[in-house]
């Protein structure tokens, strides 16, 4: 029997910090990433993707790019990629953005993100 999963995108809260750091594999390679996550969470710039109550991704939305919205980061756990979470995080950022323009950027080598942005 197939069970429906419940996807939720919400604002990040201080209690999310441990889950976000554990989720993001880059934090194990670069300790500054954990500081970045903590700072963004403290400033209210993180939004979180949950699946059945488990944190599976997050995004960071700031307004440092010439006063416009900037999705600085979208991260989805490997097991949840290509399941709609990335698209939902982008949609959430678009709906919350306080400016008429919303920007993001990715590396030329990041094909999955490029494909997500094309969709």
Image (cartoon, helix red, strand yellow):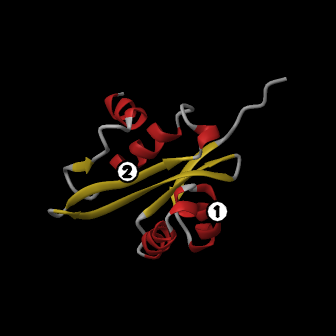
Label 2 – label 1 distance at C-alpha: 20 Å
Query: Residue 15: which quarter of the image?
Result: bottom right
Q: Residues within 10 Å of mark 2 (few under 14, many from 20)?
A: many
Q: Going by the picture, which residue comes out furthest to the left?
A: 66
Query: Residue 111: which quarter of the image?
Result: top left
Q: Residues within 10 Å of mark 1 (few under 14, many from 20)?
A: few
Q: Going by the picture, which residue comes out furthest to the front?
A: 29
User: For mark 2, what is the residue?
Assistant: 93
User: For mark 1, what is the residue?
Assistant: 19
Percent coordinates x, y for residue 57 in the rendering: 55, 50
- Residue 76 is left or right of residue 94, and the answer is right
Q: Nearer the viewer, residue 90 or 108?
A: 108
Query: Residue 28: which quarter of the image?
Result: bottom right
Q: Earlier in the sequence, mark 2 or mark 1?
A: 1
Please name the residue shown 48% across and 74% down the image. 35
Please name the residue shown 60% across and 41% down the image. 78
Q: Nearer the viewer, residue 91 or 41?
A: 41
């Amino acid at each position: 029997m197939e069970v429906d999963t419940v996807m939720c995108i919400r604002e990040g809260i201080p209690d999310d910090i441990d889950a976000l750091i554990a989720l993001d594999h880059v934090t194990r390679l670069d300790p500054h990433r954990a500081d970045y996550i903590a700072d963004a969470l403290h400033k209210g710039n993180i939004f979180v993707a949950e699946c059945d109550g488990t944190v599976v991704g997050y995004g960071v939305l700031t307004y440092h790019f010439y006063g416009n919205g900037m999705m600085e980061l979208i991260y989805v756990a490997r097991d949840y990629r290509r399941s709609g979470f990335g698209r939902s995080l982008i949609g959430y950022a678009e709906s919350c953005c306080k400016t008429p323009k919303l920007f993001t950027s990715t590396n030329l080598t990041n094909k999955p993100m490029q494909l997500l942005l094309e969709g």
